[in-house]
Image (cartoon, grey):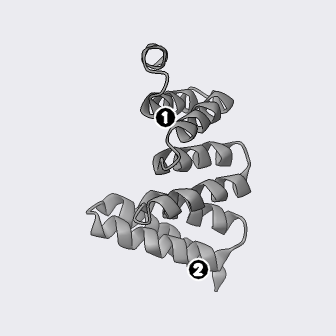
Amino acid sequence: MNKAIELQPDNADAYYNRGIVRSELGDKQGAIADYNKAIELQPDYAFAYNNRGLVRYDLGDKKGAIADYNKAIELKPDYALAYFNRGKVRSELGDKKGALEDLQKAAQLFKAQGQMAYYEKAMELWYKVRVTTW
């Protein structure tokens, strides 16, 4: 990844991919820096916003994560995974209504996109949130 960035310093995908690797290796701050750079180079990079949200969540910044998921959804309204991630965080923050709406939307999108395993995961979490709400 470093060589790709060295050869093409304006390649948002290279920073995005290195961010994924850094996050998986536990370098959360490095991952955020790479996602920031990817977003700087390509401001409509919904996947970078979503992944930066995941890292922010891992670091305990749930409100920052939601802000990133919001932006990812704004840029890509059919981004099922961003709805799922936001729903999960909303649930943890006590916004059960928002969580249920997001998880239902995520499930609908996953199903429409033929991603049945993710559909089932979204419905499972939706049910858990619903049961704890009533």
Q: Tell me the mark number nearer the camera, choosing from 1 and 2.
A: 1
Q: Are marks 1 and 2 in contact (CB under 8 Å)?
A: no
State how far apart marks 1 and 2 are (Cα).
37 Å
Horizontally, residue 7 falls left or right of residue 29, namely: left
Can residue 35 be seen here?
yes
In front of the other: 45 or 69: 45
55 to 13, vertically: above or below:
below
So how many labels did they put on this image? 2
Please give the name of the residue rendered at 58% of the width and 62% of the height, measured from the top-left corner: 70
At which x and y percent is residue 69? Answer: 57, 57
Q: Which numbered disc, 1 or 2, marks the residue that appears first in the sequence?
A: 1
- Residue carrying label 2: 131
- Nearer to the camera, 6 or 57: 6
Compared to residue 13, the image places residue 79 above or below, namely below
Q: Residue furthest left?
A: 114
Q: Please identify the quarter of the rendering in which residue 119 is found.
A: bottom left
At 72% from the left and 71% from the top, the residue drawn is 94
Quadrant in the picture for the N terminus: top left
Coordinates of residue 59 in the picture (x, y in percent)? 71, 42
- In this figure, which residue is indicated by the disc labeled 1? 16
